[in-house]
Amino acid sequence: MTDPPSPTDSDNKSRTEPYDYGFNDNDNDNDNDNDNEDSDVDGDLDAPPELITNADDELGVLYPLDQPADTDVWWGDEWECQRCGTPNTTVRARRGSEIQEPHTCVGCEREGPFFPNIGETNYTPDEIAAELSVDPVFQPPTLATAETDDITFQSVWNEIRDYIHTNWAAGDDRQWLYDMLTAYAMSTWFRDREMFVPHLLVTGKHETGKTRLLNTLRNVSYRGVHVASLTPAYVYRGISEFDITLFLSEYHDLGDDAQQEVDAVIKAGQKRGEFVGRATEATGGGYEIGNFDPFTHVGISTQFPPRDDIISRCFQITTQPANRRMPRRLEDAPEIREKMLYLRYSTLNSERLGAAQAAAEAQLDEDGVFNRLSEKLWCLLTITQLADVDVSEFVTAAVEREKEREAETEEALFLRAVIDETFEKLASTRKTGEGENWENILLKLTNIKERFDRLTDREVTPAYVGHIRNRLDLNRVRRAEGTYIRDPELKPKLKKLAENNGVDWSPTPGVTDTDTDTDTDDEAVDTFNGTDLTDSDSEAEADSADLADDSQSARRDAIRQALMLNCTDGSPAKIDDLVADVIASGFDEIKVRNELERMIRNGRGIQKAGEREVEPL
């Protein structure tokens, strides 16, 4: 389609008057009184064109006009002939139907071409027409006859908070969660102006409200979509073409490819300007290489916790059984979405939003909140500034939870094991009169692995802890009797790592008070004496056998083999024993447990035989 000519005065007269859904200031008194004293409107209504619907289930595109505080809607039925400029009318667009251009111009009786007949706006007809989808993946806001005079951030905050509280139970001791969830949902409507967005991680047992919470948030979020499964193509098209807010249930049930794509979106989609590389099929064959911008809010629910790098980018909520009677049916909230659309149009490009962002950043600095937590909180506190609400209880809870999370990560627990092992070695050298020798101290990796196993209440392979050591950049040496951590900069490195990971620098009580059974063989002396040690040629080399092929099929084969070995006498196998046997071969524990759950659910050669036991199917 060629670029349309600029509208003329006669063209504008041929159009209908702008739709007034409460978005327009159509008073004709021509005075300068502020008729919307209680409204949160700076003056202009300005936001990108937006797909909307009405009470008759017709679809249209809301867009701002050049006239301040004025909007219009193109319903797919008003067209203009590019040959003669005559207005033409067809039928309005509906879900599942096709957008109908005129066949023949009523003026020149020629077959177009036609372009959408729109009012004076900074957006082109093509840009507006591109937003009109007759098969949207999300539920568009419904424009009715909302009175906008009383719509404020505070009033809509209260409506959304009440809606979430009505449909999901946080528990009496976690009322601050409603503030967090309200700010989260409202922030999705201003994603265009945000530099960072938080994600949600919802964990909990069966029937504790995980899916109910995601559905509730979908109903009040910007272009919210909730799915129980998806494909990699859906992830990227949904975000790139429709800018959806993605809510996903049963994350743990996804196949490897889909789960990796969701993980990539969570990791790269929190910060504006980060991209995911994609290869797509090109027209005529072959592939096209490009970058995909995954910036969006994501909420997932799962029975098993994902990796630490996913958890760190999320606000984590553990659901509990409802402590009060909940509605059987979740009612939709079209009125709330309409009001949020109004606030989006009145605030998105306003100075007021910029001032709220600056105030939120100053609040974070004043509270001493930095690093990733400040990124997750920034857009939420921007909303609370606009709504003028006190959420100090939520911020305090978020800071405390972040400290707990940092102390629970694999890196933190590994550091705890290393620090305890180090202080125990130092205590031993002090007893022999050797004094402290940080530069040459040797820390046997198998001893650290045993401490790590006790801290995590599981048994991992030496290769597993070797990868954690490598991530923390702690140097190692090898000798005939095993692998050791030996780092000339051990003390400053450990202190810095402990600070960054929320680990107490002092040893665990009791570690240096009594003798222990950790391995201190004569040939494995506590400190480096300059002999019989060799540095590894490659830091990428594993500290034990190479990790196994960690594909889905390899995991399934390993699970089936371990099942046969554990059930040779006909008795069931304990799940924890089975998992331990599989990860001993180098498989990732979380993936093994997820795969085992999928195999049980889908009847792939294995079935439950008790609460914590399985047997061949």
Image (spheres, rainbow, N blue to C red):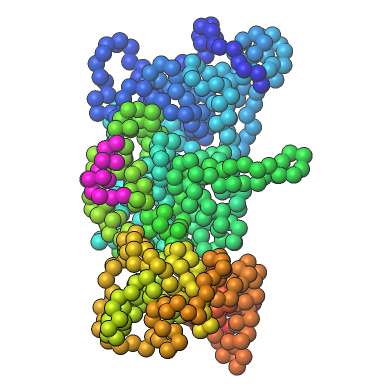
Part of the protein shown in magenta = 358-370
Residue 20, can we see it?
A: yes
> Between 253 and 139, which is closer to the camera in this rendering?
253
Q: Residue at x 24, y 39 (%)?
A: 388
As drawn, which residue projects farthest toward the front? 530
Residue 327 location (% of width, % of height): 37, 56
Q: Residue at x 54, y 70 (%)?
A: 536
**Can residue 366 be found in the magenta stretch?**
yes
Q: Residue at x 58, y 42 (%)?
A: 291
**Snapshot quadrant of residue 95:** top right
Residue 192 location (% of width, % of height): 44, 36
- Residue 545 higher or lower than 280, as above or below: below
Residue 305, can we see it?
A: no
Going by the image, does 129 lie left or right of 173?
right
Residue 2 location (% of width, % of height): 65, 18
* SS majority, magenta: helix
